[in-house]
Image (spheres, rainbow, N blue to C red):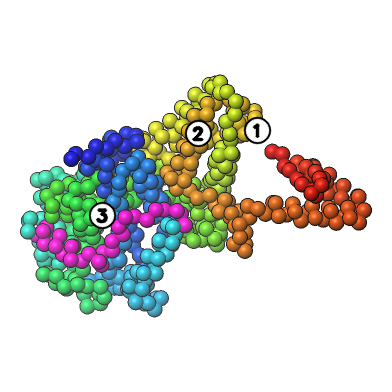
Amino acid sequence: MKETFKPKYELTMYNSLTREKQVFQSLIAGRVGMYVCGPTVYNEVHLGNCRTFVSFDLIYRYLLFLGYKIRYVRNITDVGHLVGDVDTGEEGKIAKQARLEQLEPMEVVQKYTNLFKSVLGQLNNLPPSIEPTATGHIIEQIEMVQQILDNGYGYETNGSVYFDTQKLITEEDIYGNLSGKKQDDLLTETRDDLKNQSEKRHASDFAIWIKAGEHDIMKWSSPWSVGFPGWHLECSAMSTKYLGKEFDIHGGGMDLQFPHHENEIAQNVGACGCQPVRYWMHTNMLELNGKKMSKSTGNSILPAELFAGSNAILSKAYSPMAVRFFMLQAHYRSVLNITEKGLADAEKAYTKLLEAYHTLQQLKHTGEAQPTEDDDQINKLLDMAFDAMNDDFNTAMALAKLNVIIPKIKALHKGRLAITAISEATLDRMKEVFHTFIFDIFGLVDEAGANTASDSTGGDTSNLVDEVMQVVLQLRQAAKDQKDWTTSDLIRDQLQAIGVTVKDGKEGATWSKKD
Ligand SMILES: [Zn+2]
């Protein structure tokens, strides 16, 4: 039986391969296969990478909202370009970190994988459906190298195997399209170490299997040599394994377009004979104070330092939700510049949005509605928030539209705008849409709500006001018992001043608060 599926809205997204916005159509109705290049786990995750993963979390969440069933695969790179230099015997990054920290290489991998997941958890990212590791898929990678060789797209030299880019460049016009590299540039490209130049037939060729040197710790047997896979191969092998030869969305940071993603396409075409990805998506860079983040120049900050306020670049700590909010204020394809002012503004705007949300949920419709133009305006703004998301996931624009509604929520709350100026259906829709956007689509957590929901002893504080008022009334009764009318009147009058009315009855005093 043919599956019928209609997403909640039609979605348009920018495809880096065709360089235009396209209406999204999944290969299988109602289902989406999405692959995002994951972290390399030999040190703490960079804030720039966090932005990429938050961006794809927003994309993932919006696709879920539209009603798709999604298989979201994000790999963990624990081998590949992290291994040492074959000829010079220079240590790989994982091996070096293992020596520095006196850990096993796999302990290093585990430690930074745990830290990575913890940071993304704090930023409230949803976990992917599958998180495969490169070392767990060596067999699949060896099989892919063999397929590439069998199909005539690779050659072996001294135990290493290279991808032959010539056919793709000159005959099939496939290599270079994603990154926009010209043929001439590719033919003179020398990305790989010079040591390999004698083994490679053309400058643009790249290694898919590398013969290990005696210093390499992470190495495996293969038909060609004891070695390890080239650093682009894992993504081709794992995306094919879990999403098929052809799948819907492949994402990553813009810096991965070349050579990583270009080489992925080449490998997939070489092994499977078809373009693997229908929509390529790339997120833009994150800058700090207008400059590229770089550890060596000191213009850099780690997520943990940002959350703890322990870096001299910033004067205070910013919570994970302030940071997440800051990120969703920009479109994923724009450069985002982190500044102290930007973070402080985001913190305020985040609080304002959550406060408006709580106020909105308290509003009740009474009386007969006589909808005015405000009703119409609110509905249009809600529509526009969805339009923005449907136009290449424009979270910044969607947020701006919701922000325009906030003063209206305040006016309704204060009575400056009569509740009858909007229909009950509009009020219900506002409540629902704000909830959906804030928690489901933007993936925000109510940090203040989470803090006030429990006190330091871990107990519920929702009854705290009642309990404190009982103490106050007992003190007043004690004053009255001693005929200390000055104190008892003072308590009553001070409470009245903050809107709390005390009534003396036969059963004792009661209190009420007017809004
Ligand atoms: Zn990748």
Q: Is residue 324 magenta?
A: no
Q: Residue at x 31, y 37 (%)?
A: 7
Decide which of 261, 455 is in the foreground and name it. Answer: 455
Quick check: 425 above or below 329?
above
Ligand 1 within 8 Å, label 1 CB: no
Which residue does the numbered mark 3 point to in the structure image? 260
Indicate the position of residue 147 as horizontal and vertical percent values. Answer: 10, 58
Residue 190, numbered label: none
Indicate the position of residue 424 as horizontal and vertical percent values. Answer: 52, 29
**How many C-alpha atoms fall within 10 Å of the one at disc 2: few (<14), some, or many (≥20)?**
some
- Label 2 SS: helix
Do the residues bearing badges 1 and 3 touch, measured as CB atoms within 8 Å?
no
Q: Tell me which label, 2 or 3, sits earlier in the chain.
A: 3
**How many C-alpha atoms fall within 10 Å of the one at disc 1: few (<14), some, or many (≥20)?**
few
* 1 displayed left or right of 92: left
Q: Residue at x 13, y 55 (%)?
A: 271
For the residues labelled 1 and 3, the Cα–Cα distance comes to 56 Å
Mark 2 against mark 1, which lies toward the viewer?
2
**Magenta-tinted stretch:** 122-149
* 251 displayed left or right of 275: right
Q: Quadrant of the N terminus?
A: top left
Which residue does the numbered mark 1 point to in the structure image? 414
For the residues labelled 2 and 3, the Cα–Cα distance comes to 48 Å
